[in-house]
């Protein structure tokens, strides 16, 4: 054999051995704590599947730093004590580099406190409490989803431009319900001081008989209702609003009312004319990036991506790019690398804000409508509210954390 050929084969062989050696090394490990049983799976499986889609692409390209990304899942069954125990097991026994989850805000706050003590980065992918990156925020926690303060302010920004003046607030009597309602109303009063609050109705979580509340609301004759419901309450209230005629008489708003998780289970029976907000819609924005994301998700899982798919996917991208920028598997260097990072996504460029580790997401405001293309309602008259118009300023976050 010629000398040049032997040298060339040696270079190729060394390259192959280097790749093989790097993949034989310890992988980047992500521990995922979430609810994988019960109604919450309507949201959490999409987070997991979106994350898997991002990670599979990374691993197919030989991974960040030449390392694969592996993940372990734990079902906390919507119980904070179980979630905290699982976080401890993942960090102290499994030696994960990153924690990720949850849909339960109480779990998220408990795990966040533990992550701070153990100096382990924790990406919150669905919990909505504004305390996560607000008053209880710290160096080791990141919020990939919008929080209640952000959702409320975004809705107020859009509602302030509507002709409604006389409002009623109704919703689930727990932290999320009150936080959403306060977020909308407090900001709406600032933007449009002429608005009036006629009254409030609060019911226990899981309520199915809304007739007494709806009767009282109709008697008060408001122009508009802020309905602060979450989870199964979203669909239950929409069904009641249509059955009682409320939806035809008084327009109302629910955060995520326009999202696929709320509308798909109802098919064409969902009420038209309901206002809502969401960070992700599989048909909007109508861009090549979103179309490619939807097509890949459908090819992989045989369904349309819901809002959680965006959160999971973005987390996967941040984990890979953060360690690649850090240059080594080092938690402190990873945090330094990822805070302030800007990445491409199906909804455009997204920044993980350095001052509070909150992902700066656009908010889409629209109203439900039937269309011939789908066997469920979608959002129409969509308005995009950029994060700069509704996110709390960094100075506000600093004040909260004091």
Image: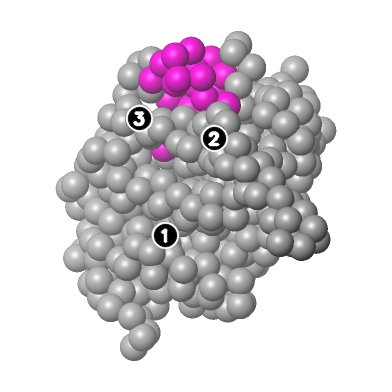
Q: Position of residue 325 (x, y in %)?
A: 77, 41
Residue that lies at the very extreme toward the bottom in this rendered image: 372
Q: Quadrant of the N terminus?
A: bottom right
Figure check: 255 above or below 123? below
User: Crowdedness of circle 2 by 10 Å Cα count: few (<14), some, many (20+)?
Assistant: few
The residue beneath circle 2 is: 24
Alpha carbon separation for disc pair 1 and 3: 21 Å
Query: What residue is shown at x 72% (from left), y 31% (from top)?
Result: 328
Q: Quadrant of residue 5?
A: bottom right
The dominant secondary structure in magenta is: helix
Instruction: Locate residue 159, reporting x and y percent.
Output: 59, 62
Residue closest to the eye, 110 or 276: 110
**Nearer to us in this view, 99 or 152:** 99
* Number of the front mark, 1 or 3: 3
- The residue pinned by badge 3 equals 74
Q: For the magenta stretch, what is the residue range?
A: 86-115
* 357 lies left or right of 285: right
Q: Label 3, secondary structure: give it.
A: strand
Question: Foreground mark, 1 or 2?
Answer: 2
In the figure, 96 relative to 200: above or below?
above
Image quarter where the C terminus lies is top right
Where residue 249 sits, quadrant-wise, is: bottom left
Name the one closer to the observer, 350 or 296: 296
Under circle 2, the secondary element is: helix
User: Could one spot residue 320 in this view of the protein?
Assistant: no
Residue corresponding to mark 1: 306
Residue at 41 percent across and 37 percent down: it is 103
| Badge 3 vs badge 2, beta-carbon distance below 8 Å | no
């Amino acid at each position: 054999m010629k000398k040049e050929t032997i040298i060339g084969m040696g270079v190729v062989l060394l390259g192959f051995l280097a790749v093989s050696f790097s993949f034989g090394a310890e992988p980047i490990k992500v521990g995922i704590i979430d609810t994988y049983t019960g109604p919450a799976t309507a949201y959490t499986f999409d987070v997991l599947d979106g994350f898997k889609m991002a990670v599979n692409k990374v691993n197919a390209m030989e991974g960040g730093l030449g390392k694969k990304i592996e993940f372990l899942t734990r079902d906390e069954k919507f119980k904070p004590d179980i979630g905290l125990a699982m976080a401890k097991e993942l960090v102290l026994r499994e030696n994960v580099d990153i924690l990720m989850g949850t849909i339960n805000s109480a779990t998220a706050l408990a795990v966040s406190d533990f992550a701070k003590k153990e100096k382990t980065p924790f990406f919150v992918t669905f919990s909505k409490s504004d305390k996560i990156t607000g008053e209880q925020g710290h160096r080791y926690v990141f919020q990939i989803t919008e929080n209640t303060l952000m959702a409320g302010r975004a809705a107020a920004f859009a509602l302030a431009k509507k002709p409604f003046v006389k409002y009623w607030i109704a919703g689930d009597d727990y932290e999320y319900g009150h936080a959403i309602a306060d977020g909308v109303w407090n900001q709406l009063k600032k933007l449009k001081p002429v608005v009036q609050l006629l009254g409030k109705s609060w019911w226990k979580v899981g309520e199915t008989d809304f007739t007494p509340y709806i009767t009282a609301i109709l008697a008060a004759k408001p122009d508009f209702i802020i309905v602060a419901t979450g989870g199964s309450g979203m669909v239950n209230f929409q069904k009641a609003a249509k059955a009682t005629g409320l939806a035809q008489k008084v327009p109302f708003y629910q955060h995520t009312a326009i999202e696929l998780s709320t509308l798909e289970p109802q098919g064409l029976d969902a009420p038209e004319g309901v206002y809502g907000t969401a960070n992700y819609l599989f048909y909007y924005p109508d861009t090549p990036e979103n179309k490619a994301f939807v097509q890949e998700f459908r090819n992989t899982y045989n369904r349309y991506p819901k809002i959680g798919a965006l959160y999971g996917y973005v987390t996967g991208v941040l984990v890979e790019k953060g360690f690649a920028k850090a240059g080594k598997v080092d938690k402190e260097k990873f945090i330094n690398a990822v805070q302030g990072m800007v990445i491409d996504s199906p909804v455009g460029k997204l920044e993980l804000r350095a001052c509070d580790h909150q992902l700066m997401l656009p908010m889409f405001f629209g109203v439900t409508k039937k269309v011939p293309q789908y066997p469920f309602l979608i959002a129409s008259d969509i308005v995009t509210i950029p994060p700069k118009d509704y996110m709390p300023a960094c100075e506000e976050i600093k004040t909260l954390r004091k």
